[in-house]
Image (cartoon, rainbow, N blue to C red):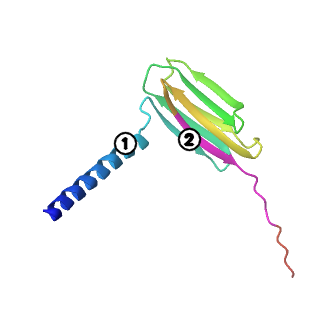
Amino acid sequence: MKTSIRTFALVIAFVASFAFNTFADEKENKKVVGFGTGIFVSKSHKLFVSVDKYNDSNAILTLTDKSGKAIYHETLNRKVDKIRKILDINTLPAGNYTIEIFSNGERYSKTIEVAEQFTQRAISLR
């Protein structure tokens, strides 16, 4: 009888841990459904931002620095359902920046790191 109680307890513990893990994964993988985005940086140091809205709400696009100061801000009204922007980030000083898109209570953000690229000097003897 002891082995059946142990087996039963083990099964309940396994099922409970699986159920809790499944609920945790669902919370972490919650995706934005009010708009779609595409954000990437080109080799020429330009930030390409694409937003497709699927709702009739306003959307806000912001680029902020580490201290929260707005570098770029644009509000998309309800009638606009697509936006394509090219932002030149080549002139920004080195540091971390955040691009955020808000619409109808949903938020999508990405962090952008701008770093100075140092070149090494090569010396050769001929």
Three-letter residue code for mark 2: Ile
Q: Which mark is residue 26?
A: 1
Judged left or right of residue 68, residue 5 is: left
Residue visible at 72% across and 31% down in the picture: 69
Residue visible at 77% across and 41% down in the picture: 91
Dot 2 surroundings within 10 Å: few (below 14), some, or many (20 or more)? some
Residue nearer the viewer, 67 or 12? 12
Q: Which residues are magenta?
A: 108-120
Where is residue 64, by image quadrant? top right
Residue visible at 23% across and 52% down in the picture: 12
Q: Nearer the viewer, mark 1 or mark 2?
A: 1
The tag earlier along the polypeptide, 1 or 2, is 1
Where is residue 126, by image quadrant? bottom right
Q: Which residue is mark 2?
A: 39
* The N terminus, quarter of image: bottom left
Judged left or right of residue 35, residue 86 is: right
